[in-house]
Image (tube, helix red, strand yellow):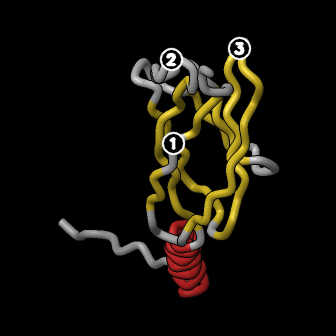
Amino acid sequence: MKTALVRIPCVHVAWLIFLIVLGAVSAAGQAVGTGMIEGRVVNARSGAYLASARVTVDGSGLETFTDEDGAFRLANVPAGTVRVTAFYTGQPAHSISVAVAAGQTVQRDITLGAPAT
């Protein structure tokens, strides 16, 4: 029994290698230029953490909602200083500035509403 050998033109192999390398470089570059923001959204009056509050990175299209413990996590945030805004029904929205370092996670809590007087 004779085994047939399939020959692939060198051009096709070169393109395949190029695309694999390009994909790896793109993925590495994206991870290096972004960071993560984690925190909790709290009600200033009651001190309670707010579930289902919407948290956004202004101008980026990134958004998430807090879990039942008021915690949120925003991934792939562009490195640099960004504005993060929290929204919750019945409370005025509140924005904070956050400095995000590439490849790092920043912890920032957001307080909504005026404290009780």
Q: Please identify the residue farthest to the top as the structure is shown.
A: 90
Foreground label between 3 and 2: 2
Residue 112 on image: x %, y %? 64, 29
Circle 2 packing at 10 Å, graded few (<14), some (14-19), many (20+), is few
Amino acid bearing label 1: Asp
**Res 46 label:** 2
Mark 3 sits on what residue? 89
Q: Secondary structure at mark 3?
A: loop
* Label 1, label 2: how far apart the Cα atoms are: 15 Å
Residue at x 52%, y 28% (from the top left corner) = 42
Q: Is residue 21 above or below residue 57?
A: below
Residue at x 48%, y 35% (from the top left corner) = 40
Q: Is residue 107 above or below residue 99?
A: above
Q: Earlier in the sequence, mark 3 or mark 2?
A: 2
Amino acid bearing label 2: Ser
> Do tag 1 and tag 2 residues touch (Cβ < 8 Å)?
no
The total number of labels drawn is: 3
Residue at x 57%, y 26% (from the top left corner) = 44
Quarter of the image where the C terminus is located: top right
Is residue 49 visible in the rendered image? The answer is yes
Query: Considering depth in this image, is 66 or 109 the residue closer to the camera?
Result: 109
**Res 101 label:** none
**Res 109 label:** 1
Q: Secondary structure at mark 1?
A: loop
Q: Please identify the residue farthest to the right as the structure is shown.
A: 59
